[in-house]
Amino acid sequence: MTLDYDDLLNSIMASLDRTKQVEVSEIPNIDLYMDQLLTFMEESLRKSARHPGVDKILTKTMINNYAKNDLLPPPIKKKYSKDHIILLIFIYYYKNILSFSDIQTLFDPLYKRFGKDDADINLRDIYTTIYDEQEEIVATLKKDIQRKFKVAQESFPDAKGEDKNELQMLNFVSLLAYDVFMKMLLIENIIDHIDEERNPGQQGKDSKKRKK
């Protein structure tokens, strides 16, 4: 079977366009019970799931696990606030690439402002500032994907038919994976630096309980 490169690339770009951030204005201003929270998160983030409609964005067990690991403050009278939702959105983006202890390290400036709407910079300000960069990030990512795709498409010129398609797709995924790997190393180095600044003399984070 001959691979249609144009269709594949167009599909990749379309998937990036469908993955949009949750705007602060879209987050309810009223506190939500657990079932309402799960419904909101599902409706807001399902387009970013690998298998929309099948994969669960969030479950009660997940939320309880986050609370147990001190990632999420407990609900107030069984209700979750706008600040709870902001933290959960951050957790959703971080949880597949960072350990709970790493997320805790990054969350320190968020915890300090949790529930403090009158702060000079509150959680909503932080969330808006970070995710206002989304369009530029996606635009840059598209250009990088197109470049890597072209490199992969031109690789293995001596291969034939299905074998050539498989080798080129392996190359394309490998280029993307190496990019992710290097960025993960960078993120881990930054987090270790932050942790060392807060805890001078600590020998890395091996002594900390790390969970995914």
Image (tube, rainbow, N blue to C red):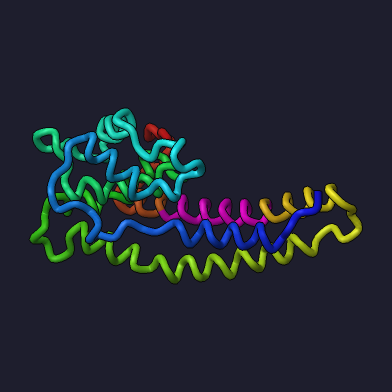
Q: Quadrant of residue 123?
A: bottom left
Image side of residue 207 versus residue 81, left or right = right
Residue at 78 percent across and 48 percent down: it is 166
Image side of residue 12 versus residue 68, left or right = right
Residue at 22 percent across and 64 percent down: it is 125
Q: Residue 132's spot in the image, x, y percent?
A: 34, 68
* Furthest residue toward top: 61
Of residues 71 and 161, the one nearer the viewer is 161
Residue at 52 percent across and 70 percent down: it is 140
Tell me if residue 101 is in the magenta stretch. no
Magenta region: which residues? 174-190
Tell me if residue 181 is in the magenta stretch. yes
Of residues 79 and 11, the one nearer the viewer is 11
Of residues 37 and 190, the one nearer the viewer is 37
Image side of residue 68 versus residue 135, left or right = left
Q: Quadrant of residue 33?
A: top left
